[in-house]
Amino acid sequence: MPPISRKRRAPVDEEEDEIATPTQSQRNRGEESPVDEEDDEEGDEQESGSGSLAQLSKCLVRYALACEYSRIPIRRQDVGQKVLGSHSRAFKQVFEAANAQLMDTFGMEMVELPNKEKVTTRQKRAAAASESQPKNSNQWVLRSTLPDKFRIPDIISPPSIPTSEVESAYVGLYTMIISLISLSGGTLSESRLDRFLKRMNADQSTPVDSTPKLLAKMIKDGYIVRVKDNSAGEETIDYVVGSRGKVEVGDEGVMNFVRTVYGDDAMEDLDQRLNRSLGIIDGGGVPSQLQPPANEQGAGRRRPGRPRRRGHDDEGDDE
């Protein structure tokens, strides 16, 4: 009898051990499962919550479109305050994601504005004396990425606010003034600009507004910059291309504008003349504006020979 009882108890013990083991593992898994669920919930919040990359990038896209509508630069400081909030460290990731959405959906991209150009002597001296000069402006504007064949009025029409006619006139006027400044070597005096506007009967009023208000609007929007300089003892007023004008119009826009004005009557060497006027680097790698004129390229070089004598022989020695 005792041996039989031992044989019967042995299987029971084994069954108890077998049952106890999975119960232990299940208990361990049960203790870890809440943590895993919390991690999953946090991941879901990061993907779809207010602080997620997708949501922040969408907010930046909307903010960029709103700024472009008002022609206000997209400043990094404003993005941190109005879009990112406590997620300011994720600026780079949010910026790249927003730029990708802008290109895929709207055919635009955020392009950084160049730093303000130092024009006056005082500004140049201050820049040279300053040890820390910002390399980046941390300001962006939207620029179209559509191919040229799609940049036509039927596809890209002017905004209808206030009206499409007024907006079209404004675009044409600031493109013309930027072209005049660029083709004048990058600086155009106020008196010369007044003469140009008078020739077009736009020295007093324009389809957009009065001429003074039009120029003030262009300055505010960043298309042109009005520079006062009295370093020489007499005050001079010049106009240069602004940061938005350089990005939105640029040399390519100036060249297209001039080609459109000339139309089919353009001379054969129009592109070469434009390159020289705009200072675009030629095939030799030297800006055209830095090259000496053809009649001065050989100046300073004389053929070897006897030294010139002063006196009556000067006329005979000149060759």
Image (tube, grey):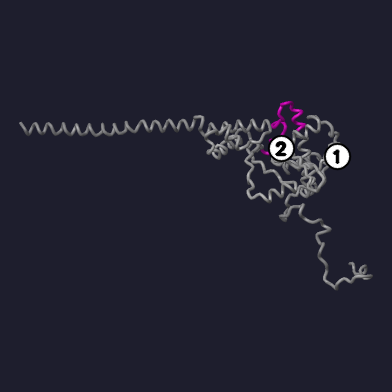
Q: Secondary structure at mark 2?
A: loop
Q: Quadrant of the C terminus?
A: bottom right
Q: Position of residue 171 (x, y in %)?
A: 75, 34
Residue pointed to by mark 1: 195
Q: Residue furthest right?
A: 312
Q: Residue at x 91, y 69 (%)?
A: 314
Q: Residue furthest left?
A: 1
Q: Residue furthest bottom?
A: 306
Specify the segment rendered in magenta.
Answer: 146-170
Q: Quadrant of residue 295?
A: bottom right
- Give the number of the disc on residue 20: none
Three-letter code for the amino acid on which mark 1 is drawn: Arg
Count all numbered tags in the image, as a single digit: 2
The reply to whether the magenta stretch includes residue 45 is no
- Give the number of the disc on residue 222: 2
Q: Is residue 18 above or below residue 306?
A: above
Q: In screen coordinates, is 133 left or right of 211? A: left
Label 2 neighbour load within 10 Å: few <14, some 14-19, many 20+: some
Q: Residue at x 24, y 34 (%)?
A: 21
Q: Quadrant of residue 80?
A: top right
Q: In screen coordinates, is 99 left or right of 154? A: left
Three-letter code for the amino acid on which mark 2 is drawn: Gly
Q: Secondary structure at mark 1?
A: helix
Q: CB of mark 1 within 8 Å of CB of mark 2?
A: no
